[in-house]
Image (spheres, coloured by chain):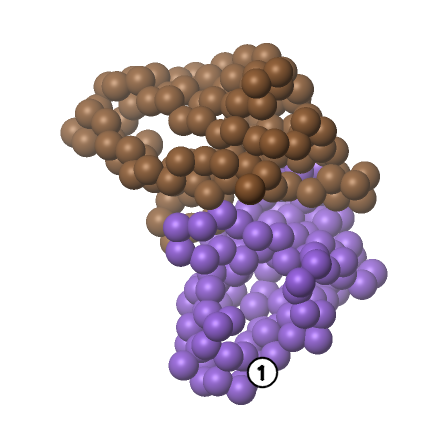
Amino acid sequence: GAVVSQHPSWVICKSGTSVKIECRSLDFQATTMFWYRQFPKQSLMLMATSNEGSKATYEQGVEKDKFLINHASLTLSTLTVTSAHPEDSSFYICSASRTGNFYEQYFGPGTRLTVT
Amino acid sequence: QKEVEQDPGPLSVPEGAIVSLNCTYSNSAFQYFMWYRQYSRKGPELLMYTYSSGNKEDGRFTAQVDKSSKYISLFIRDSQPSDSATYLCAMSPQRRYNQGGKLIFGQGTELSVKP
């Protein structure tokens, strides 16, 4: 149990276009979902936290208009990178928690975004 | 200074060795400590979770927290090639985001266990 999927696993897009990444909790309902960004050989940086049906809470320094997060249901959250640029190239990982407790969050496999 | 410091390695050990992975931190408010394993191009997987100080054992893995020294450790006994991965420590002052918590990750230590 506690499986989280992400789609796509890898995406290449051109500069200026938008990309949507989906995060799904497959066998549980997630009250809270988290979006992280990870650069090569670096730690995970929390971008935003979202609860179903409410607006996402963004971390300081994360542009809300650039990284749009929608937590449409208890099993689905999406991250849209708008007007992507090469510096947005990164590994994006979501996690989902049934309880909201950090030690009970389950991570997706990640999405590698490359912007050319 | 980063809130959580972790030696990135790489650390290479022979199969069967005892592995010691460590993190230091500066925020004395941290109470919840976690260790994650991350294989290449995959999401992290929770290995161990500890609240406050003390030891916790699960199979070949032992987690230790020394709050007085602001130092946490993960020990892997009888290491196997399948343990080769990046190990990340993470910690938070609260258990939930909506309680004022925020999970801070270390950089991760890359471990390679050679057959």
User: Is A39 displayed left or right of A101 in the figure?
Assistant: left
Amino acid on which disc 1 is placed: Ser
Q: Which residue is the extreme one toward the front?
A: B1
Where does residue B69 sit, x and y in percent of width and height?
57, 18
Q: Is A95 or B102 nearer to us in this picture?
A: B102
Relative vertical location of residue A46 with respect to residue B70 in this rendering, above or below:
below
Query: Where is the N terminus of chain A found, in terms of image quarters?
Result: top right
Query: Where is the C terminus of chain A found, in terms of image quarters?
Result: bottom left
Residue B58 in view, yes or no: no
Q: Which residue is the extreme one toward the left?
A: B115
User: Toward which corner of the image does residue B29 lie, by quadrant?
Assistant: top right
* Image colour assigned to chain A: purple
| Chain of residue at mark 1 | A
Dot 1: element: loop
* Residue drawn at (29%, 23%) of the image: B79
Where does residue B109 sit, x and y in percent of width and height?
39, 37
The crowding category of the residue bearing disc 1, from other C-alpha atoms within 10 Å (few below 14, some 14 to 19, many at least 20), is: some
User: According to the colouring, which chain is brown?
Assistant: B
Q: Is A105 or A56 nearer to us in this picture?
A: A56
Where does residue B86 sit, x and y in percent of width and height?
38, 40
Residue B8 in view, yes or no: yes
Q: Is A77 or B76 nearer to us in this picture?
A: B76
Q: Is B107 or A93 nearer to us in this picture?
A: B107
User: Is A54 displayed left or right of A89 in the figure?
Assistant: right
User: Toward which corner of the image does residue B59 lie, by quadrant?
Assistant: top left
Circle 1 residue: A83
